[in-house]
Image (cartoon, rainbow, N blue to C red):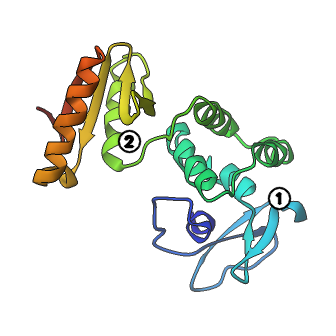
Amino acid sequence: MSAAALWRISRWTPDEIHVIAPGGHRRRAGFRLQTCRRLDARDMTRHAGIPVTTVARTLVDLTDVLSAHQLANVIHEAAFRRRFEPAAVRTAMRRARGRPRLAQLEQALVLNASGSAGTRSELEDRFLECVLDAGLPEPDVNVIVEGFEVDFRWPGLIVEIDGPGHERRRTQREDRERDLRLQAARHGVIRVHGGGAA
């Protein structure tokens, strides 16, 4: 998470500094040390003068704590900042053989290639978790429909998750306008405010 924050590709702000290093290093105050069996020199670089894992290796490490849709959002942000190279990520994945959750990153790469920006907020994370826990079909997440990025899409149905920012009058007016355009294109639209449907 610290590397992702340094690269400015994550919506999370870590509450402490995480340092990764090969085994044999001693813990010190001021940061959390995570050891690994082997840290390839090709997975390390410097950014703003700070030693850091490459974006590709950072994505591999984030599989320990993020879901595929959350990883897809990190990839989306990295691509926006021109720091995402699919070939470099796959090479880093090959060097990390044996990591138990690499399938999460593989799925995230597929999601990104399909046009998904992944989940953008905790509200979206929670809604998607509820959908999957209920055994419902997995929707497309943050994809472009009729020129608009929509939160969740199933065939014929769009669900938008409205956080506090949607309480502004101007935003509500813009939401109504886009909902009408989506409905005119034969998409049902449901808006969910916080924890309840509207």
The residue lying toward the viewer, choosing from 105 and 151, is: 151
* Residue situated furthest right in the rendering: 41
Answer above or below: position of 136 versus 119.
above
Label 1, secondary structure: give it.
loop
Q: Is residue 110 left or right of residue 128?
A: right
Image x and y of residue 119, in percent:
43, 42
Q: Is residue 76 left or right of residue 36?
A: left
Say what amino acid the circle numbered 1 marks. Answer: Arg
Label 2, secondary structure: give it.
helix
Rendered residue at 36%/16% (across/down) = 136
Residue occupied by mark 1: 37
Answer above or below: position of 107 versus 74.
above
Where's the C terminus, which quadrant?
A: top left
Tell me if residue 64 can be seen: no
Tell me if residue 162 can be seen: yes
> Dot 1, crowdedness within 10 Å: few (<14), some or many (≥20)?
few
Nearer mark to the viewer, of 1 and 2: 2
Residue contact at pointers 1 and 2, CB within 8 angstroms: no
Rendered residue at 20%/43% (across/down) = 174
Answer above or below: position of 99 versus 154.
below
Residue occupied by mark 2: 125
